[in-house]
Image: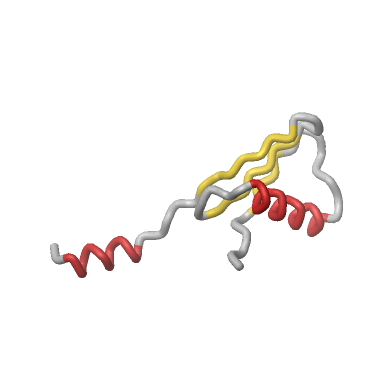
Amino acid sequence: MSNIQEYRDRKSMKSPEIENIVVDEVHDRTYVVMAHKVLNDGELYSAIRVELLKRGSFPAKGERIVIPAPKVR
């Protein structure tokens, strides 16, 4: 296989999404932020905050929230 073909194969493969998990032990909630990379604290907080504002209410006790990948700026 040529180097060009290997490059095309690697480029066409989608990177797997990573589950960035945040556990809120005080309120008994779990947030799972899907992304293509490991997110830092600020990116996680921002994604969770935006999702909670979209919902308009806080999740129920014990709820697990899966948040799609945040848009890259």
14 up-or-down from 64: above or below? below
Would residue 55 appear left or right of 11 to someone viewing this image? right
Question: Where residue 52 appears, x then y in whole percent?
Answer: 79, 52
Quarter of the image where the C terminus is located: bottom right
Question: Where residue 71 appears, x then y in whole percent?
Answer: 61, 64
Q: Residue at x 21, y 67 (%)?
A: 5
Would residue 29 appear left or right of 34 to someone viewing this image? right
Color theme of the render: secondary structure
Question: Where residue 61 appears, x then y in whole percent?
Answer: 81, 34
39 up-or-down from 28: above or below? below
Question: Residue at the left extreme?
Answer: 1
Numbered-mark total:
0
Q: Residue at x 80, y 30 (%)?
A: 26
Q: Residue at x 81, y 33 (%)?
A: 27
Question: Where residue 2 appears, x then y in whole percent?
Answer: 14, 66
Quarter of the image where the N terminus is located: bottom left
Residue 50 sits in quarter: bottom right
Question: Residue at the right extreme?
Answer: 57
Camera-side residue: 6 or 55? Answer: 6
Residue 12 sits in quarter: bottom left
Q: Residue at x 70, y 44 (%)?
A: 65
